[in-house]
Image: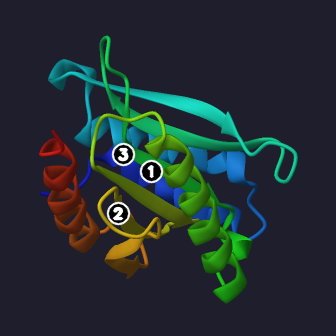
Amino acid sequence: MPYGSGTTNQANWVTRLGPTATQDKLHALYNTILNKWFPSSKGYAIDRQALGGASKPGRKSFFVRHAGYHRDPLLIVEFKRPAKWNDAGKQEVLEGLTESMQAQFEQTQYNTIYGLGGIGLHWTVYKMEKDGLPVPTMVLDWHDDITSDVSYDAFETVAELVYNIR
């Protein structure tokens, strides 16, 4: 089942902006996709967190959490502007996810945290588990268009993994 026209229109708009589109132009697209899979009607909350500290001030991520008292993160989302679609950009995304997931493990009750990394419309997923090394392992290799039918099916699988975190 493909994404609706609102989501694909957002993706088309980002594509038309080209590689020089700034990161803030991606917020609506990623927020729309996250709300599709993790709606408040199913007990999820999506919020934006400023992260980074002195080494990377102003870095922002989306966190998917259970709504309510225990607001431990289930999925951390970091994305970059389309111009970062290169090996250095991929490494930057992985480093950002690693830093965010490691920091959240100190506070979470869960044994697994997932991380979604995006560069423009390209996306990938990692997970980190408490019983292993504090290093993310790839769950889903890079896909070219987060709004494609193939990506929709892949995201459904990722969402199921997140739903099952207990």
Q: Where is residue 69 in the image (x, y as percent from the top left)?
A: 32, 11
Determine whether, in the image, residue 103 is placed left or right of residue 114.
Answer: right
Q: Which residue is drawn at 59% across and 50% down?
A: 26
Badge 3 element: helix
Pointer 3 residue: 33
Callout 3, which amino acid? Ile
Pointer 2 residue: 127
Q: How far apart are marks 1 and 2 (CA)?
A: 30 Å
- Of badges 1 and 3, the one in the foreground is 3
Q: Which residue is drawn at 82% across and 52% down?
A: 56
Q: How far apart are marks 1 and 3 (CA)?
A: 12 Å
Q: Which of marks 1 and 2 is nearer the N terminus?
A: 1
Q: Residue at x 22, y 48 (%)?
A: 162
Q: Work out whether residue 136 or residue 50 is closer to the camera in this orientation and state it.
A: 136
Q: Which of marks 2 and 3 is nearer the N terminus?
A: 3
Q: Position of residue 59 (x, y in %)?
A: 73, 46
Pointer 1 residue: 9
Q: Position of residue 104 (x, y in %)?
A: 49, 42
Badge 2 element: strand
